[in-house]
Image (cartoon, rainbow, N blue to C red):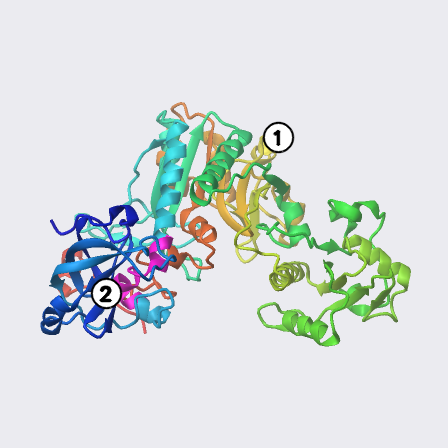
Amino acid sequence: MYRTHTCGQLRLSDVKTQVTLAGWVQTVRKFGSITFVDLRDRYGITQLLFNESLNDNLENQPLGREFVLQAKGVVNERSNKNLNIPTGEVEILVNEFTILNRSAVPPFSIQDDTDGGDDLRMKYRFLDLRRNAVKKNLELRYAVNRSARNYLHQNGFMDIETPFLIKSTPEGARDFVVPSRMNPGQFYALPQSPQTFKQLLMVSGYDRYYQVVKCFRDEDLRADRQPEFTQIDCEMAFVEQEDILEMFEGLIKAIFKDVKGIDYTEKVERTTWEEAMWTYGNDKPDIRFGMKLGNLKHPSTVFSGKQAEVSASPLAGTTGFGVFDNAETILGIAIPGAAEYTRKQVDELTEWVKRPQVGMQGLVNIRYNSDGSLKSSVDKFFNEDQLKAIANYCNAQPGDLIVVLAGKEEKTRKAASQLRLELAQRLGLRKDTEFKLLWVLDFPLFEYAEEENRWVARHHPFTSPKPDQISVMINNDPKIKDADKYLDHPYANIKANAYDMVLNGNEIGGGSIRIFQRELQEKMFAALGMDEHEQQHKFGFLLGAFEYGAPPHGGIAFGFDRLCAILGGSESIRDFIAFPKNNSGRDVMLDAPGTIDEKQFDELQIRLDLKS
């Protein structure tokens, strides 16, 4: 046999045992007639001691980094113990060794603090995967996978595979398409999700389905996107929203317990989409810290806290300060303990919001001094009572610095959200070791596509309206007669029976209660601009299934890669994927995508005509 033990297995209790190890040479250290070798495999590192009796052999067969080596010998207690590794109290007195394979000099060092950049390590990903840091990420990924499967199995879910070669139904992200040789001129698509299949499984009576499944989207990439990604995809029949929330809170809590040893006993907070947008500036807020936005112009959108105690916004009317008077939206943030910021620090924040990525013209600052007095950069327009009212709206305390942004609603809200996160990062409030879950509920069912003057689904076209709003959707014509007044249309106020789970400011899961009646599904498709022919062509199979006893059902899909990255304290999902693509969607190791030869084009009856 090649080995009797792994390189992470031996302990003091194994002293005097004859063993055989096999692995990769991490380091070679010569001390006169004695040589030490660190041998590494997936399980750990063990020190090998080659005494002078093997010197001639080592001279004839010199060892290099990443050589594949088999060593036989006796376990011995080390005189210079290394308590930083589990095997650090023992070593192997080698009496025989075999070089199983030699290695070229690796292009970068195979260690945690490697000298290889991202591009180089992705080109030689098979070497990068040997590094302990990457190995730990894949071990965490496996642990999350195993925990999820165990929980779902224990709760009666059945793992059912669905096809990868399906029909293209463009709606949302672009499909990857696959030509069919047996059906010339026709194409499969790779699924963006198993959405319609899992609904069909509900119609088929498999009332608790799950799948850890690959999904594909041909879209522009960022650090948190890949053209192929993994979901924990789940669906349940005969459920309401509350059943889904309870079941999948349990799933994430089980993963926390199994993978991180965290007993998440607190109740998962909930917020509506509208409240999240006005209180945090986005629909996936990080609630590990406070610093909620103060809405200084629109008191009708106040939700909680001190703001609710104030009868009218201090900036709702004319103030004489044109920047505020001409703004659609004015939002303030109280920075805890920052009243002592220097002029330089405040100027730095002002320059930060002026960056193109944020896009604001500047900010107003108000110092809420520890003695209760207030001083602002716009004192000539506001008296102290007005400044105090602004401070109350922002839930500020003495010692805080209030920063205020003003401008167009969407832009200002986005900028305030970015600034809130940046401030929290600078204050050390976003700790990788702290985890905070949140449900975001009551999303709008539709968004208005201005260029096309039509509705689009905010989630997807199979999401049901809230039960009390189904009649609004059924009984109203979705057509928009006056584009400028789309907000007055009944469809603008329909809420989706949908929910997102947010972890530390990242959406890790999203789902909904589905439409299961043909009439309502046809109405949804019509609202999205599909005529009867298009509905039948794209989704006739689903509409037909709804005529054969479809049960009420709903589900959720978790972004498996993103969940692993958050639990592993990383900003990028690439660190938790064995063979990821780069930001251009290329596999630089395989050099894919690539061209195919003329014979393949002929078999597929396809002609390539690249447009210049």
Which residue has dot 2 on it? 37
Q: Residue at x 74, y 73 (%)?
A: 342
Left or right: residue 471 versus residue 10 is right
Q: Residues within 10 Å of mark 2 (few under 14, many from 20)?
A: many
Residue 55 in the magenta stretch? The answer is no
| Mark linked to residue 81 | none
Residue 302 lies, with reference to residue 342, above or below; the image says above
Quadrant assignment, res 537: top left
Image quarter of residue 470: top right
Sequence order check, earlier mark of 2 and 1: 2
- Residue 110 x, y percent position in the rendering: 30, 66
Amino acid at circle 2: Val
Indicate the position of residue 171 as horizontal and vertical percent values. Answer: 43, 49
Label 1 Cα crowd, 10 Å radius (few <14 / some 14-19 / many 20+): few
Taken as a whole, is the magenta stretch helix, strand or loop?
Answer: helix
- Residue toward you, 312 or 306: 306
Q: Which residues are magenta?
A: 122-137
Q: How many marks?
A: 2
Q: Amino acid at mark 1?
A: Asp
**In the displayed image of the protein, which residue is found farthest to the bottom?**
344
Indicate the secondary structure of the residue bearing disc 1.
helix
Question: How far from the left and from the top, in percent, is residue 564?
Answer: 42, 50
Q: Is residue 123 magenta?
A: yes
Per the image, the residue denoted by label 1 is 468
Helix, strand or loop under label 2: strand
> Which of 457 and 501 lies nearest the eye of the viewer?
501
